[in-house]
Amino acid sequence: MTTIFLGTSSYKRLALANFSAKLGRLQDLFGEYVERRKLKAILGSLSESELRDIGLTKAEVLSLENLPLKESSGEKIATAQKARNGNW
């Protein structure tokens, strides 16, 4: 096994790159959280018949709460819509 020693400046650059990557991921998760709240507020205010008109159910809107943040709520809603398109 080879051991590599980093100089102080190399270590700082590596630490900064790692921090930047984690900060970027945190921003992505927060953006998804905000998007999900907007979707739930808009779709949650629609009646069952209005949701059916756009190919969704109340249960699918409520399921957004249980979806992990790493999964896109917009994609989940779009997939549910496409799956039911024309089946009403």
Image (spheres, rainbow, N blue to C red):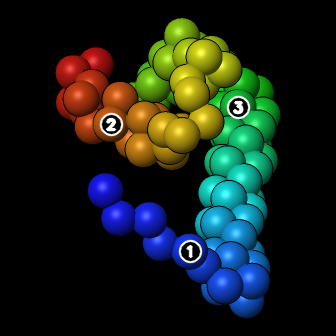
Q: Which residue is mark 3?
A: 40
Residue 54 horizontal/vertical position (percent): 45, 35
Residue 45 sits in quarter: top right
- Quadrant position of the C terminus in the picture: top left
| First reached walking from the N terminus: tag 3 or tag 1 | 1
Q: Is residue 16 left or right of residue 55?
A: right
How far apart marks 3 and 1 lie (CA) works out to 50 Å
Residue 55 drawn above or below residue 17 = above
Residue 24 drawn above or below residue 35 = below
Whether residue 18 is visible to the viewer of this picture, yes or no, is yes
Residue 17 drawn above or below residue 9 = above
Q: Which residue is mark 1?
A: 5
How far apart marks 1 and 2 lie (CA) works out to 49 Å
Q: Residues within 10 Å of mark 2 (few under 14, many from 20)?
A: few
| First reached walking from the N terminus: tag 1 or tag 2 | 1
Q: Nearer the viewer, mark 1 or mark 2?
A: 1
Check disc 2 and report its element: helix, strand or loop. helix
